Image: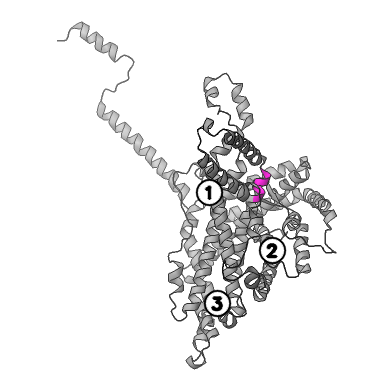
Amino acid sequence: KEPNGSRNSFDEFFNGVNLPDAPANDLTSRMKNFVLDHEAALGEMYKVLGEDIGDSWDAEHDPIGIDVTPIDQEPIISMVTRFEGNPQFNKIVIVFAHLCEEMREMEHLAERRFYGVLAMFGHRDEEDGEDKKHSSSDQADADIAPKIEPEGEMGMFLPFFQDLVNFIERAQAVIQNVICQLACLYHARQKLYMTTFKNVMLLPLFERLGGLCRVLVTMDVIIADNPNIADGWHQYKRMIKYVRSDPKGYGVEEGQLRLFEGLLVRLDRKVLNATIFEDAVSQEFGLPGAVSNVSLVGGNKVLFSEFTEALRRLMKKVGAGLGADVETYPRTAVVELFALYALYRRIFAQGKPDKRMFKNLWEMQLKLPVVLLHGRAMWFPSKFLDDYAPLKTSGLNPSPTQVSKKRKEYLRKLDDDFIRKGEEIYMHVMLWMVRMESRQTLKTSGSGRGMDSLLAARGKLVINGILLGNQIRNLLTTSIALHLALQVPILPKNVRSLAVLAELLKAIQATYHRSSKMLAENIAHLIGQTLFQMKRLIAPLRQNMLKTRQSKMTAEKNDIISALTL
């Protein structure tokens, strides 16, 4: 028998604790609650991932995601060398294919690695800093970041700028290599040109070359638009002067200081003067120690005619839908066209420029007065032509003195039609979202024809959403950029439409996010359907060429068969 004192101590220990009389019943109740909660969670997951319309998970806090990016399963070399009957043709295709791939990767690297850092260099959240300073909380005072002087920040970013110098030098080398490769191929004495490439236009190569030039133009515009870079560089050079006057006082050896100053001069010349594109188009395009620029490139009439024809085709392709409600190509394609034209003018500076081509390019600003490259970095067609490819000619529309006036007229018309355009886009986006949610489900009997129709309908929906997003982006960025550039206030009646358009962009993004399951299931089949359609168009041509007798097979027909097989 326990003493009374011990029992009282146990009562005090368990005082206020609700313990069940039967532990088995308590465990059963807990397991039942767990099963019910787990069933509810599975039900929510089924609603989100199923075909029914339900609430989507938060796109900003996804623990996992589905990458639906198509990846090549076969290297370029193995694809080209599969046809062994024409090794010379295979070599040329491999070289240009790798150059196009490298230029595309460099574009993605610049967008991912350099644009954002250059645009945000030296920017600080001063308003939040002031709020924290006036706060009485000790934690708020601890969160205030110490202020970094401009020269200190520039010193911290020197490794980044060195990486940028390496990237720029590689880009300039790639541009030079592409031009030399084209000059060696498109030459009057080149046998392969006379047999095959005389009737072939390598338009994708010119497009990729323009894309890489556009990257250099964008970097120039971003650097020139950010005054913090110039201020930080100026302060850093002043600091280096103090170090030079007394190296020992700063613990620096004179030899290392001279080497470091050489790196700074290289950085100043390559990057911080905002002449990246100018250096790229002004470099020597001949083969060092072999053939000069004039004889190989500048004086190459065949290359001149091919380059001119490529510019005309690109101008027709880009300018066809420019300014329309639905533009198929991004507006950065216009910047690529102008950059390619500037390169063309510098290479063939001894020739007589085509005034008609210049006028057509100049008139594009009537449909597109400004392009927003990144952040607040703006690109103007007329200013670019004046800086890199000027040409004195009469009959320009608009005249150089009327450029600013035409921009204001364009903005005035855009403000007047802004609400109407916003309402039209709103209706199109709502209709597209309903169709995307319905998944365009077709009652098919399992036949291949019904499945083809289903894939075609879903593919059309995916593309239409991208076109709608591009239309909204163009309208928003053009309006905001022109108001900033011309210092014109936004009309109060258009503020709500601006907010609605921004909301529609997020709605399109959320709709794609809700359709992640459908996209993951169908993207490979959509690409395959497109490839099969292309194969149906090419297959009859190849069969007709293969019917040619071996005795009548010429080098030109052999190259055509190689191209069709590839």
Q: Who is closer to the viewer here, 512 or 102?
A: 102
In which quadrant of the rendered image does the N terminus lie? top left
Horizontal placement of 465 versus 382: left or right? left
Locate residue 553, reporting x and y percent: 51, 89
Q: Is residue 256 above or below residue 302?
A: above
Q: Earlier in the sequence, mark 1 or mark 3?
A: 1
How would you rate the neighbour count of disc 2 (Cα within 10 Å): few for under 14, some for 14-19, many for 20 or more? some
Q: Who is closer to the viewer here, 502 or 185?
A: 185
- Residue 288 lies in the magenta-colored region: no
Spatial CA distance of label 2 from label 1 is: 27 Å
Label 1 sits on what residue type?
Answer: Asp
- Residue 224 lies in the magenta-colored region: yes
Label 2 sits on what residue type?
Answer: Arg
Horizontal placement of 146 versus 369: left or right? left
Residue placed under numbered mark 2 in the picture = 346
In magenta, the rendered stretch is 220-226
Marks 2, 3: nearer the viewer: 2
How would you rate the neighbour count of disc 3 (Cα within 10 Å): few for under 14, some for 14-19, many for 20 or more? few
Which of the 4 image quadrants contains residue 44?
top left
